[in-house]
């Protein structure tokens, strides 16, 4: 049930990569592909693993919808406190899959309790930048 493919079926790396690209595009559109291209320019194998595993395997599981997955990722990256570039990508992704700005702010508020105020404030400032960029583009 949680596997993206049926048990017993053989799948290739190309299948996982293709499924991952579809999922990544569904979440991030061109921005996701740009990140993969940037990583691929310096480490092609790393870019492939990112797509295959991160999006072809994990994001393609059926246990959570994309909206809930992005809420979890925003919380995790905020709690790390040192992943601002990745947090900005996933704040945009969260908005792309239906998470509201108010919900993002609530997640950041929760992180003040569990990750501390510095990490939550870093997340808040990252969200402020993402919101402003999206507003300017609208």
Image (spheres, rainbow, N blue to C red):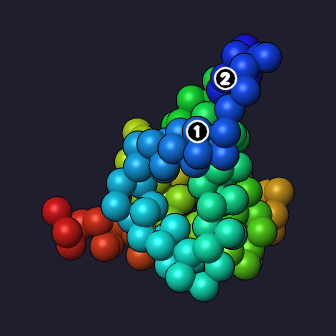
Please tell me how crowded label 1 is: few (under 14), some (14-19), or many (20+) other residues with Cα within 10 Å. Answer: few
Looking at the image, tell me whether mark 1 or mark 2 is earlier in sequence order: 2
Residue 114 vertical placement versus 132 (above, below): above
Which part of the image, by quadrant, shows the C terminus?
Answer: bottom left
Q: Is residue 10 visible?
A: yes
Q: Name the quadrant of the N terminus.
A: top right
Residue shown at 65%/79% (left/top)?
43
* View extreme (left): residue: 138
User: What residue is at 61 percent from the left and 73 percent from the top?
Assistant: 44
Tally the numbered discs.
Answer: 2
Q: Is residue 48 above or below residue 43?
A: above
Residues 93 and 30: in front is: 30
Q: Name the spot of residue 18 as percent of width and height, x first.
A: 51, 44
Residue 114, picture quadrant: bottom right
Q: Position of residue 38 (x, y in %)?
A: 50, 78
Residue 112 left/right relative to 67 = right
In this rendering, position of residue 14 left or right of residue 101? right
Residue that numbered label 1 is attached to: 15
> Do the residues bearing badges 1 and 2 touch, measured as CB atoms within 8 Å?
yes
Name the element at disc 1: helix
Measuring 31% from the left and 73% from the top, which residue is drawn there? Answer: 133
Identify the residue under disc 2: 5
**Residue 78 pos. (x, y %):** 68, 64
- One can see residue 101 in this view: no
Residue at left offset 42%, top offset 76%: 129
From what the image shows, is residue 14 above or below residue 123? above
Relative depth, front residue between 124 and 29: 29
Nearest the viewer among 103 and 61 is: 61
Few, some or many residues within 10 Å of mark 2 (<14, 14–19, 20+): some
């Amino acid at each position: 049930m949680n596997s993206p493919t049926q048990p017993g079926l053989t799948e290739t790396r190309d299948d996982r990569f293709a499924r991952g690209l579809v999922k990544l595009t569904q979440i991030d559109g061109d921005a996701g592909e740009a990140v993969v291209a940037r990583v691929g320019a310096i480490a092609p194998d790393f870019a492939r693993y990112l797509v295959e595993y991160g999006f072809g395997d994990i994001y393609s599981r059926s246990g959570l919808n994309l909206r809930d997955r992005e809420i979890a990722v925003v919380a995790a990256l905020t709690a790390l406190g040192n992943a601002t570039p990745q947090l900005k990508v996933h704040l945009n992704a969260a908005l792309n899959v239906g998470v509201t700005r108010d919900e993002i702010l609530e997640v950041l508020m929760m992180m003040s309790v569990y990750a501390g105020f510095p990490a939550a404030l870093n997340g808040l400032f990252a969200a402020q930048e993402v919101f402003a960029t999206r507003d300017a583009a609208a």
